[in-house]
Amino acid sequence: MTDDALLRRIAPCGLDCGRCLDNPDSPIGRHARELARELGGFGRRAAFFSQLDPVFAAYPEFERVLTRLGQGGCASCRTGTCLLGDCRVKDCVRERGLAFCFACADFAACDPGLPPGLAERWRANNRRMADIGLEAYALWLDGQPRY
């Protein structure tokens, strides 16, 4: 994978934009569109099936989520908008001329302004990238669940 492709795929925070639920080109987006295609007009039949199994009464909500997953809204935070709308990380690295947070002299003391769980993940991701390199990090991500 080229450096440009890795930069599109991996966000400055270390999250995998290439597998994000908001990326229409991600496996989630592709599978959602395929599932919607396979289900076809099932929505017209959901009421009948809900008589057989009540779970199908929720099909309209499921279909709404499935449609949203198939459309996505961002190809990566470097080229679009992050689903976490107020994330400052992508803007900070751009302003500093960096690709990833770990390359910043202020990384150790930085408070990225992320929610607590995501802030810890941001720090761990960037430490791992610094330790093993971007290509090895991308391979490691491939073996991890996205969420």
Image (spheres, rainbow, N blue to C red):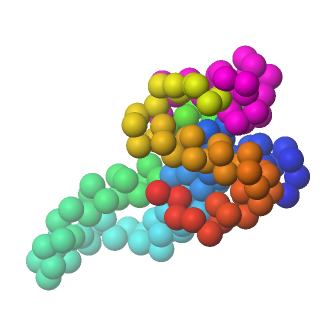
Figure disc tally: 0
Task: Evaluate whether residue 70 shows in this view.
Answer: no
- The residue nearer to you, when weighing 110 against 46, is 110
User: Residue lying farthest right?
Assistant: 2
Residue at image location 70% in from the left, 36% down from the top = 102
Left or right position of 144 against 119: right
Counting from the top left corner in percent of width and height, residue 79 is at 70, 33
Q: Nearer the viewer, residue 45 or 84?
A: 84
Q: Position of residue 121 (x, y in %)?
A: 51, 46
Q: From where the camera sits, is residue 133 visible?
A: yes
Q: Residue furthest front?
A: 108
Query: Residue placed at 35% from the left, 58% from the top?
Result: 63
Q: Position of residue 54 (x, y in %)?
A: 13, 73
Magenta residues?
84-106
Residue placed furthest toward the top: 95
Pick whichever, 127 or 11, lies toward us. Answer: 127
Please tell me whether residue 86 is drawn above or below residue 61 in the rendered image. Answer: above
Q: Quadrant location of the N terminus?
A: bottom right
Q: Is residue 109 above or below residue 83?
A: above
Magenta stretch encompasses residue 125: no
The relative height of residue 95 versus residue 23 in the rendered view (above or below) is above
Rendered image quadrant of residue 74: top right
Q: Is residue 97 magenta?
A: yes
Which residue is located at x 34 percent, y 70 percent?
42
Position in image of residue 13 (x %, y %): 61, 39
Q: Residue at x 44, y 49 (%)?
A: 68
Give the side of residue 71 with respect to residue 53, left or right. Answer: right
90 or 47: which is nearer to us? 90
